[in-house]
Amino acid sequence: MGRPGGRGGIRFTPRAGLGWCAWSALWLSACAPAMPPQNATPRGRFDWSLERYENGKYHDAIRGLRDLLVREPLHPTADSARLLLAESYLKTDQELLAANEFRQLATSRPNSPLADDAQLGVCQSYWAVSPDLPRDQDFTEKTIEECTRLLEFYPRSELVGQARELVAEARQKMAAKQMRVGKFYYDRGFLESAIIYFENILQTYPEADVIPQTLFMLHDCYGRVGFRAEAGMVKQRLLELYPDSPQAAELAESEGDGG
């Protein structure tokens, strides 16, 4: 038989209750989200968040930086805080939130010394979520658009080289995507549809690595649908511009064999 006043022989006394409450308060304090001190100055809040970021505590940095920007949106550290907030989102795989923060800084503060950094951040955020070729390439296109914006608005920025590299990579990916679709139709004998995609690659992405393969298959398509003149021009283009390519060698060999 249990003791009076308790279940299973345990009595809840006021002293025990106080101990439990103290332990619970300690546990909740340990698990509470880290935040800058309530009485911290704006600069103190920024320094607190920067320290968390540098120590890899990105979620703490996010909370501190958001708190600062809500309290003091016009403080001298606001631009740096928003850039650091966006970088923290990137570090925690929240790329679209990062893109929004980068864009807000780049568009609302175009004369800020950090505006070009922010614009590059938009590019990098979209590139980070650019999917594999079988999927839709909207984010790849956005990468090109945002990097082109940096090149147009900040042509003297030291970040121009990085933006151009991203544009080049993204364009290669878009060309490969078009090639994938064109080859889908080519392999199934839908030659007219394949021609449309192959011609689009030649016009839109003339620098792409897939151009020799595109010309090779386009030559075959034109030949099989009876467009001999077009096939001849494509052949000439392949042999003149890419004479050392495997496709040029294969085409020359097939022509030599009477193929």
Image (cartoon, rainbow, N blue to C red):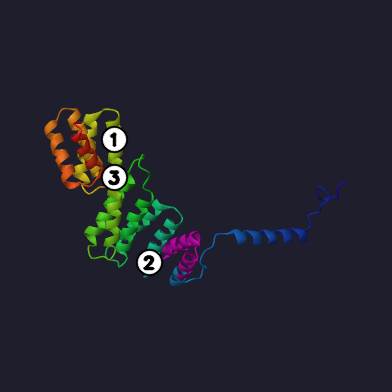
Q: Nearer the viewer, residue 86 or 180?
A: 180
Foreground: disc 3 or disc 1: 1
Residue 69, image x, y percentages: 41, 63
Residues packed near mark 2 inside 10 Å, few (<14), some (14 to 19) or many (20 plus): some
Q: Which residues are magenta?
A: 47-75
Q: Earlier in the sequence, mark 3 or mark 2?
A: 2
Q: Position of residue 81 (x, y in %)?
A: 40, 65
Residue 137 drawn above or below residue 162? above
Check disc 3: other Cα within 10 Å, few if <14, some if 14-19, many if 20+: many
Amino acid type of the residue tagged 2 in the rendering: Ser
Q: Look at the numbered disc 1 and give the secondary structure of its residue.
A: helix
8 or 161, nearer to the observer: 161
Q: CA distance from mark 3 to mark 1?
A: 14 Å
Residue linked to disc 1: 183
Answer yes or no: is residue 141 visible: no
Q: Amino acid at mark 1?
A: Lys
**Residue 195: % across, % down:** 21, 34
Q: Which residue is mark 2?
A: 80
Horizontally, is 243 left or right of 130 in the view? left
Q: Nearer the viewer, residue 37 or 189?
A: 189
Q: Which residue bears the numbered disc 3? A: 174
Nearer mark to the viewer, of 1 and 2? 1
Q: Quadrant of residue 122?
A: bottom left
Q: Secondary structure at mark 3?
A: helix
